[in-house]
Amino acid sequence: MLNPFFIFIQQVFSVAKAKRQQQVFSERKQSDSSKCFLSESNKCFFVTKAKRQLQLHQCEIDGDERSIVMYVLAIDGGGTKTSAVICDEQGNIYAKVVTNRSNPTAMDVQYFKSTIHDILQNLQQQNPQVFAAIDSCFAGMAGVKELQAEEVVVSIVRQYVDKTVAIFVDNDALIALYAGTLGKAGIVQIAGTGAITMGYDSEQHFHRVGGWGYLFDDEGSGYDLGVQVLKTIFQSYDGRGDSTALTDVVLRYFSVENVPQLIECIYGAEHPRTVMAPLSKYVFDVAEKGDHAAISIIEDACKKYYVAIKACYFHMAWEQGNVPVVLVGGVFNNEAFFIPKLQQFTQADELPLQFLTPVLQPIGGAVIAAFKQINVQLGSDFVEAFLKNYEQVGS
């Protein structure tokens, strides 16, 4: 049995070490900025980690067995809606907001800023005490990388949280990945209205493939599938292709009597892309009934995904073992059409890719990212608790 006095001395030195870490950080902060080697986010991580160590050691000395609760602010900003929560490491949710879109590429910059302000004010009003105790913030947002708007988000969040809070902003693809891998490295294949493939390794270095816009890219997206549906219908009408059940389904969808009338439905729309993307859902309905044209469209999409995933895989360095590939987006709601085919491609090339779908919503991935940035490991029961609490808490 260890000497109680020896244990006490160890605890005292541990507290002193944590305090010294905070002191060192303060000295670095006061030094000339050209000599400072830490980024703003890393500075905040340094302080947060030191604060946590100090709290834990103080509890040991005081004989307090209560666990130290850490709180994070997580934001999932997309082109359709934005979700935000304050959450602890047990999956408890203390405030929640679900509001309109927050993609800076699809909205006025002032409206974008106003949306972020409104979200933060709402969360703060719901639970001022916990909001004031936030340790880390992670915002996964569509469009911020393209417009280099990360600093805009950071500057707004900084107005509401303590100066020691670590704030991180990244592409929404990262939180989509973490919603499936629970914070581990891997590749995420997104196929919604648009499509993009992104890989993040264990050092969070990333590589992007595709997603360069619907006019000439976004292969395998809902829009791309919609284009293939219309091509198939018109080629069948002309006699350039086989007959397909897609024709009758799409004519009913647009409430028109013949194929040429579809032209006005598409070209007469203010945003044809939003009219064409929803047609992708009919591919799966018709394919289930054995329509060869629909099955061909799905198989072609699988090839496009695999080419992008394979390119991403070979551009990055991976540790030994399987590399998870998370399939995200409305197109993959029909995962049974894709995973077996993608596995066939992988086996043929003998690549260690493991295809899976998310176990959390993207906002859950943002929570995981926020804790990961301050080096907090989540327990095995986090996922179940978060899913339950997220549905129960109002917005």
Image (tube, rainbow, N blue to C red):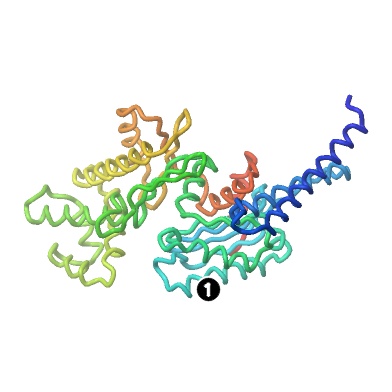
Left-right relation of 302 to 325: left
Say which of 347 and 291 sits in front. 347
Left-right relation of 324 to 288: right
Measuring from the top left, give residue 89's x and y in whole percent: 66, 48
* Whether residue 49 is visible: yes
Image vertical order of residue 291 relative to residue 79, above or below: above
Residue 338 in which image quadrant? top left
Regarding mark 1 in the picture, which secondary structure is present there? helix
Residue furthest to the top in view is: 1
Say which of 350 and 379 sits in front. 350
The N terminus, quarter of image: top right
Which residue appears at 81% of the width and 40% of the height?
Answer: 14
Which residue appears at 51% of the width and 47% of the height?
Answer: 179
The C terminus, quarter of image: bottom right
Which residue appears at 57% of the width and 71% of the height?
Answer: 117
Image vertical order of residue 66 relative to residue 120, above or below: above
Q: Residues within 10 Å of mark 1 (few under 14, many from 20)?
A: few
Measuring from the top left, give residue 342's x and y in whole percent: 33, 36
* Whether residue 288 is visible: no
Residue 16 in which image quadrant? top right
Amino acid, disc 1: Ser
Left-right relation of 76 to 246: right
Measuring from the top left, give residue 250's x and y in whole percent: 22, 59
Left-right relation of 279 to 32: left
Say which of 89 and 247 sits in front. 89
| Residue that numbered label 1 is attached to | 114
